[in-house]
Amino acid sequence: MIEQENSNQNGQGNKTLTTRQGHPVTDNQNLRTIGNRGPATLENYQFLEKISHFDRERIPERVVHARGAGAHGVFEAYGTIGDEPASKYTRAKLFQEKGMQTPVFVRFSSVIHGGHSPETLRDPRGFAVKFYTEDGNWDLVGNNLKVFFIRDAMKFPDLVHAFKPDPITNRQDGERIFDFINNTPEAMHMITFLFSPWGIPGNYRQMQGSGVNTYKMVNKEGVAVLVKYHWEPLQGIKNLTQEDAQAIQAKNFNHATQDLYDAIEQGNYPEWELCVQVMSDDEHPELDFDPLDDTKIWPEDQFPFLKVGKMTLNRNPQNYFAEVEQSAFGTGVLVDGLDFSDDKMLQGRTFSYSDTQRYRVGSNYLQLPINSPKTHVATNQRDGQMAYHVDAAQGQSGHVNYEPSTLDPLKEAPKAGADYEPQYTAKLVRKKIDRQNNFKQAGERFHAFEEWERQDLINNLSSTLAPVDKRIQDKMIELFTNCDPEYGRLVAEGIQKCLAEGNVSKGPIGNKHSDEAVQQAQEVS
Ligand code: HEM
């Protein structure tokens, strides 16, 4: 048998530099050349292997959420959901027993810009959690904000195109963003959060998380409830004004990654409590919004936050690429007792994640240690690029990779409870939902903000809208007025003020471009 750690290298033990073929490298400095001034020859195998692997070091970035940081930790269940035993709502095993621990990996991210973009940009933040449960993996792929811009997955590529850099100038452009948004009134709630300090969390430790979309929990009897998930940071919440963010960016554009890494290295482990809101599984005609509409918050006084457990992040990745870059989360990754709802966004997302991961990481991305469940995996799926091992059961015949089989089948698992079997009778249509109510919660949010938050919101909207086409400005003012007349008036006045001061240059959303702001940033740096 060949020892992997081979020590046959001139007595230097396993620290000898080798090629990937295991050949000891005696010269890592010089190409083989004809004379010491070149030219080089084509049989420079050692060099060609080294450089061609380097040429392939990058995999495609995530199309969204490219910039991120990750950490490992543990989730501890309370055994209850609010005052009730967890089993009342769900048979998912990870929630049932008080003190039960499930390992987790979390990736935080910003959405729009590339892999090394500043972490101070105005952007939702991703909050994706992978639970390695005894029943296989559960991914809760959320954001820091509790609502989203759109409620139909059909619109997602257009939304992202509008926020990404202009295809000609390669710069993010408020005009393109508001050109899309002034035709997307359901985005007003999210826009109100995004342009306030909530659009720039101070760091990853001091922000909330939310599943945003509506899911279901199913109990042993096969009875489902609608559910929304929330992560509440025990470190408190910290958000930045535009000026705070610009001052940080002038000194450090990796501040959130650094903050998370340093806190964990110092043993200052960040913690979040997982809470759910639940609703019976029906359309709830008594509400002025649809419970499947992800542009809405479920009012906390009617649907209280019920505590489910606590997550602690206590270990940094050993290798950023292997663990953070190659990690792959998806909304379809659910365990028994947790289910989808009919939320149209959730259904669209569920196809998109594993589809992009087969392209971004490769068809065997689930065999990578960061993505692989920490439990029994036995499938009849085989081969494909970079297949590292066979997903077979121990002792399973190498001959039988199909099912059913008389010879050596993998057997279907027994059911853990009654099936949940919703019934549908409706026409197949392309239609918006009823009860859109696009403006009410946005107006309420505008009033609920503290004064400094409202002030920052108005400043950020005004400076972004001042340089855009007048038709878009007017339509946006109309939409803000629909949310609340004072909201519309303040944005209109803010735009006029920016125009009067000449603060009208285009740039990343919310950024101040006045001479005064540039001077402030220069003073800080
Ligand atoms: C990442 C699609 C809506 C949260 C991604 C990725 C895609 C995607 C393709 C890249 C995944 C990868 O390369 O591994 C979509 C679609 C959506 C949608 C089609 C709507 C129809 C949302 C919403 C949220 C969200 C509403 C918040 C709840 C995230 C997060 C990530 C992500 C956190 C990064 C996951 C990670 O850290 O690897 N999304 N998304 N997405 N999305 Fe969405």
Image: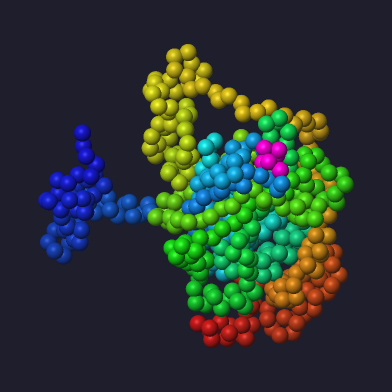
Residue 88 within the magenta-colored segment of the rendering: yes
- How far from the left and from the top, in percent, is residue 282? 80, 39
Residue at image x 64%, y 82%?
514
Using the image as rendered, state which of residue 499 and residue 144 is in the foreground.
144
Using the image as rendered, state which of residue 479 and residue 321 is in the foreground.
321
Question: Horizontal placement of 258 versus 333: left or right?
Answer: left
Residue 241 within the magenta-colored segment of the rendering: no
Total labels drawn: 0
Colour approach in the figure: rainbow
What's the magenta region?
Answer: 84-89
Question: Horizontal placement of 174 versus 388: left or right?
Answer: right
- In this rendering, the answer to whether 226 lies above or below 418 is below
In the rendered image, the residue lying farthest to the right is 286
Residue at image x 43%, y 20%?
400
Residue at image x 80%, y 55%?
301
Residue at image x 78%, y 58%?
185
